[in-house]
Amino acid sequence: MVWDVQDVPDRIDGWSLFEERYVAILAPTHRLANRLSIGIDDLRETILLERADCDVAVKIRQSSLSEDPPQLGDCSGHELHLRHMAAAGRGVILAPEHMPRLPTLKTIRLEGSPVSREVRLLVLRGRRYSPALDAFVKVARLRDWSFEVTDRGDRAQRSRM
């Protein structure tokens, strides 16, 4: 499974599985944690935690934050480090909505969905699949990927609205 692949060789079969938005992941004590959504202007006024060598961070800055860039906080090549920094209140992570996160963190959608990515399944064409790969491809293609991920801590709050 891949995302943001531009040029797929002819020898590769590919299927689009789903498109996912990016969300803000932050500590429940963060000043933006009680909102249902976060706007781009709010991101300019907070500290963003950044992944090292992340091409999506560049897309986010180019698409929405180009005229007034946000404050960048710590940077790490390890996702778990970023999650722990966010849980400690050091800043906000912008991440795909389906990315695993610590149960202590909150997930809040971004207004207008400034950046999203298409997740695709790619396999080599013309070869017989192993039984495990064949089963995986069939299940992945048949699955309904249109569900929306909700924050574990916000389910009760959203159901009351």
Image (cartoon, rainbow, N blue to C red):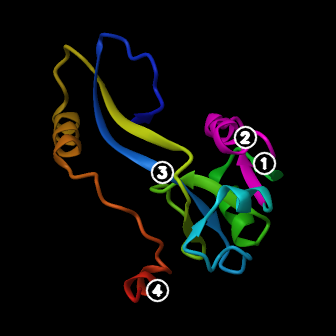
Sequence-earlier tag: 2 or 3: 3
**Which residue is under mark 2?**
52
Q: Is residue 8 left or right of residue 11?
A: right
Q: Residue at x 45, y 56 (%)?
A: 98
Secondary structure at badge 1 equals strand
Give the structural element (helix, strand or loop) at label 4: helix
User: At which x and y percent is residue 71?
Assistant: 84, 53
Separation of residues labelled 4 and 3 (CA atoms):
21 Å
At horizontal 75% and vertical 72% (from top left) the residue drawn is 88
What are the residue bounds of the magenta stretch?
A: 47-68
Please report contact status of discs 2 and 1: CB closer than 8 Å, yes or no: yes
Q: Residue at x 72, y 75 (%)?
A: 30
Q: Pointer 3: what residue?
A: 21
Give the residue type that dot 3 points to.
Arg
Residue ID for mark 1: 75
Residue under numbered circle 4:
157
Which three-letter amino acid code belongs to the residue tagged 2?
A: Ala
